Image (tube, rainbow, N blue to C red):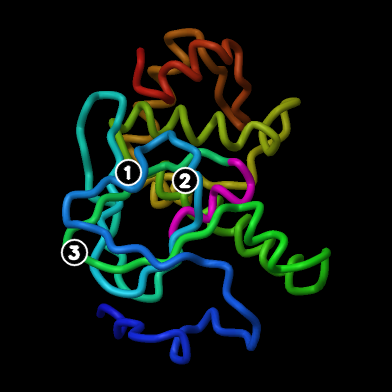
Amino acid sequence: MIDESVHDCASCPLNAGTRCPLVHRKVKAGTTLWRQGDVPSEVVFVKEGLYSLSSTEPSGTESLTSVRGPRALLGTESLRGEATTATAEAITDGTVCVGEPSTLKAWMGPPSAAATMLNLVLDELSRQSRDLALRTGPALARVARFIVASAPLIEGGRRAPFSKQHVARLLGMRAETLSRCLRQLEDDGLISSGRSVVVKDEGRLQAVAKGAA
């Protein structure tokens, strides 16, 4: 369900009784706001129109991650200088309001409970992007990516707090496929597995996780 367009500042959820620092802008269909891997130069609040978020895997396969419409806040990665995981492109003509990260931080004022909550929200968005990435690409790359991301939980010979069934569901694959991938990574000398999983060649495991090997 696409939310209702924002037609004026009075009905905008960013209207907090103070002058909004965002700048009004028209966007044409087909306009690319930023590409996957870019650090956005501004935060974008969508007033009207539709925008696609798509990602490209190392193999070259492109997938549509999601579609965002009115009242969506895009490019929040810019507030922390982080790269995006998806290309953002206008599907239709639309209207947005944009603001540079430094301008928005000044508008929000000094550190407060609201700023702390915002940081927690941004952290959660980063986690959601990471979780989504765990379910994309070839099975072997997904398993390698999970091991890389979960290294603090499994290093030092400690038993991982995940069952194989749990991990398989998280990665969107069958438990048998997970076991096969673990055996391949072990046969290739990248990990050792058993009651615990230990990384033996982090560089090569990273390459597999990126689909480069």
* Amino acid, disc 2: Val
| Residue 75 is covered by the magenta coloring | yes
Spatial CA distance of label 3 from label 1 is: 17 Å
Image quarter hosting the C terminus: top left
The front one of 183 and 90 is: 90
Seen in the picture, residue 55 relative to 25 is either above or below; the reply is above
Specify whether 163 is left or right of 67. right
**Residue located at (66% from left, 52% from top):** 102
Residue 130 position within the rendered picture, expressed as x and y whole percent measured from the top left:
49, 45
Which of discs 2 and 3 lies nearer the camera? The answer is 3
Seen in the picture, residue 200 relative to 106 is either above or below; the reply is above
* Amino acid, disc 3: Asp
**Residue located at (55% from left, 12% from top):** 203
Specify whether 24 is left or right of 54. right
Q: Secondary structure at mark 2?
A: helix
* Amino acid, disc 1: Thr
The residue lying furthest to the bottom in this view is 10
Residue carrying label 2: 167
Residue carrying label 1: 87
| Residue 80 is covered by the magenta coloring | yes
Q: Earlier in the sequence, mark 3 or mark 1?
A: 1
Mark linked to residue 93: 3
Residue 12 position within the rendered picture, expressed as x and y whole percent measured from the top left:
46, 84
Residue 3 position within the rendered picture, expressed as x and y whole percent measured from the top left:
31, 82
Spatial CA distance of label 2 from label 3 is: 41 Å
Q: Earlier in the sequence, mark 2 or mark 3?
A: 3
The front one of 22 and 212 is: 22
Q: Secondary structure at mark 1?
A: strand
Q: Residues within 10 Å of mark 2 (few under 14, many from 20)?
A: some
The stretch in magenta equals 74-81
- Pointer 1 with pointer 2, Cβ within 8 A: no
**Image-quadrant location for residue 208:** top left
